[in-house]
Amino acid sequence: MRALIIEDEAKTAAYLRQGLSENGFTVEVCTNGEDGLHQALTVENDLIIIDVMLPERDGWSILAALRKAGIQTPVLFLTARDTVYDKVKGLELGADDYLVKPFDFAELLARVRTILRRGPARQAEILRVADLQLDLPRRKASRAGVRLDLTAKEFALLELLVRRQGEPLSRTLIAEQVWDVNFDSDSNVLEVAIRRLRSKVDDPFPKKLIHTVRGVGYVLEERPE
Ligand code: CA
């Protein structure tokens, strides 16, 4: 089991690292919010413990970014403030549980075990990039509140691009993930599909989200004007 701890207080971080290591976790500690988010986005973890107050980026914003990216790793929040506001905010953003400092390690471990026992975390149901929104259970997409009329294939292609937003995806990877095949190198099936997707997702809107990455493939991301 891999645990990521994002906590700037050295004492608490060391205490958590030791306790979790003794209980069979491989533990990584990040001491600021940016590093923590980067680590959480790039390495697969079984559990993430996030302190609310962090330098560079607070715990809430880390959690929001993770859930937005579709990462459903269980998250336990730590906070020094025992307020209903904090608790509700954390849970609304998709935290799995919440502990107020100072806490007893046995209590933390019990919470961790409960979270992990719940099994695979629930899937994010709504994915968003800028004003683009994908409702996964209903297979519906919209931009700026306007419904996009997509075929099942186009939705699958868009879902892949959104789930991996900011990451240039190769033609091969897209073909394998969306069509479950590897196209011949001279096939233009993907180019045609992207063109059709752009005509629905980007052409009617001033801000373009799907970008060509020369020599690689495509990336979906919100770029500054
Ligand atoms: Ca802190």
Image: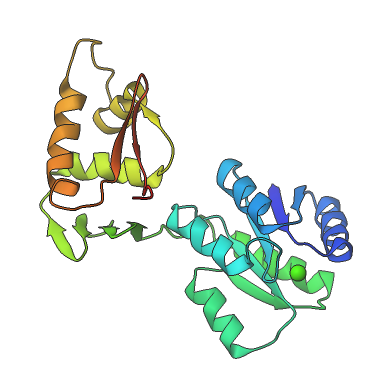
**In this view, 103 is above or below 31:** below
**In this view, 211 is above or below 13:** above
Q: Position of residue 49 (x, y in %)?
A: 68, 61
Name the residue rendered at 50%, 68% in the picture.
94
Q: Is residue 27 left or right of residue 133?
A: right
Q: Position of residue 180 (x, y in %)?
A: 28, 27
Q: Is residue 183 left or right of residue 94?
A: left
User: Which quadrant holds residue 216?
Assistant: top left
**In this view, 173 is above or below 51:** above
Q: Position of residue 93 (x, y in %)?
A: 49, 70
Foreground residue, 56 or 90?
Answer: 56
Q: Is residue 170 visible?
A: yes
Q: Is residue 45 visible?
A: no
Name the residue rendered at 76%, 66% in the picture.
109
Q: Is residue 60 left or right of residue 125?
A: right
Name the residue rendered at 44%, 37% in the picture.
167
Q: Position of residue 148 (x, y in %)?
A: 14, 54
Of the four image quadrants, the one with ligand 1 is bottom right
Name the residue rendered at 47%, 59% in the picture.
67
User: Which quadrant holds residue 23?
Assistant: bottom right
